[in-house]
Image: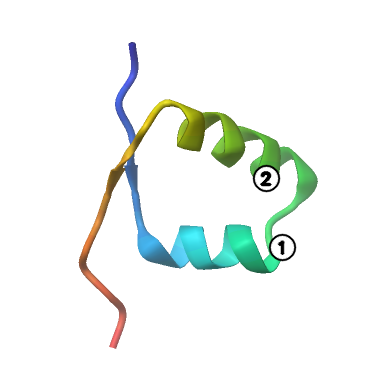
Amino acid sequence: MEQFLIDNNVISSYFSGELPDKSLLFIGKVFDQIPNISVITQI
């Protein structure tokens, strides 16, 4: 099983629908696998 580290900027873009359709599908699958989420934020 693969593990992923998701940046919170990706999460924000995912929920706002700013990502291309192919990316939305991929990130949706990653979310189903319970990814690790980065707590580092962009200032």
Q: Residues within 10 Å of mark 1 (few under 14, many from 20)?
A: few
Please state the total of marks drawn on the protein image: 2
Q: Quadrant of residue 27?
A: top right
Classify residue 18 by image quadrant: bottom right
Image-based side of 34 in relation to 31, left or right: left
Residue at the image point whose x is 33% and y is 34% from the top: 4
Is the N terminus in the top left, top right, bottom left or bottom right quadrant? top left
| Mark 1 residue element | loop
Is residue 39 rendered to the left or right of residue 4?
left
Q: Amino acid at mark 2?
A: Leu
The location of residue 3, given as percent across then percent down, is 30, 26
Is 43 drawn above or below residue 36 in the view shown?
below
Please name the residue shown 73% across and 39% down the image.
22
Q: Position of residue 36 (x, y in %)?
A: 27, 41
> Which residue is at the far bottom?
43
The outermost residue toward the right is: 21
Q: Residue at left 35%, top 57%?
A: 7
Q: In which quadrant of the rendered view does residue 42 lie?
A: bottom left
Question: Where does residue 9 sit, x and y in percent of width and height?
Answer: 44, 67
Q: Residues within 10 Å of mark 2 (few under 14, many from 20)?
A: some
Is 17 above or below relative to 37?
below
- Estimate the spatial distance between the alpha carbons at disc 2 and disc 1, rounded to whole Å: 8 Å
Res. 24 mark: 2
Q: Of helix, strand and loop, which one carries label 2?
A: helix
Give the residue pinned by disc 1.
17
